Image (tube, helix red, strand yellow):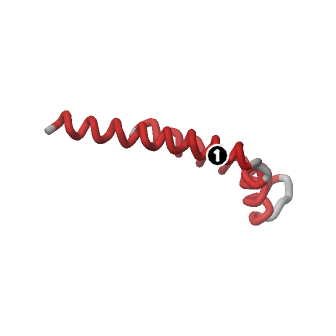
Amino acid sequence: MKIMGIALLMMGCLMAFSLSLDILQGFDVSDALYNAVRPFRVMEITEVFVLFFLLSIFLVETAYVLIKKRNEDK
């Protein structure tokens, strides 16, 4: 659970940094948000598949560790 929290915190901080740099360069907030998600729009289908596959492996592993810890506590 700590790993997932750290990963989400890092992603949030990096996105906030990216958005603040875009805003400081003179972009509107909507344009800055569009620039933040644009790399995901130009991905090919195989890249999207690999991204979701890796994310699903991460989530399944995290869920497995949580379930294993709960069963050990009982």
Give the tally of numbered discs: 1
The N terminus: image quadrant: top left
Pinpoint residue 38: horizontal percent, then vertical percent. 77, 54
Pinpoint residue 57: horizontal percent, then vertical percent. 49, 39
13 vs 72: above or below: below
Q: Which quadrant holds residue 32?
A: bottom right
Pinpoint residue 65: horizontal percent, then vertical percent. 34, 36
73 left or right of 33 in image:
left
20 left or right of 8 in image:
right
Q: Amino acid at mark 1?
A: Phe
Residue at (79, 51) in percent of width and height: 42
- Name the one closer to the observer, 63 or 38: 63
Most extreme residue toward the right is 26
Q: Secondary structure at mark 1?
A: helix
The C terminus: image quadrant: top left
Most extreme residue toward the left is 74
- Name the one closer to the observer, 30 or 45: 45
Pinpoint residue 29: horizontal percent, then vertical percent. 75, 64
- Name the one closer to the observer, 36 or 22: 36
Q: Dot 1 surroundings within 10 Å: few (below 14), some, or many (20 or more)? A: few
28 left or right of 11 in image:
right
Q: Which quadrant holds residue 70?
A: top left
Residue at (72, 55) in percent of width and height: 37
- Which residue is the site of mark 1? 49
Residue at (72, 49) in percent of width and height: 45
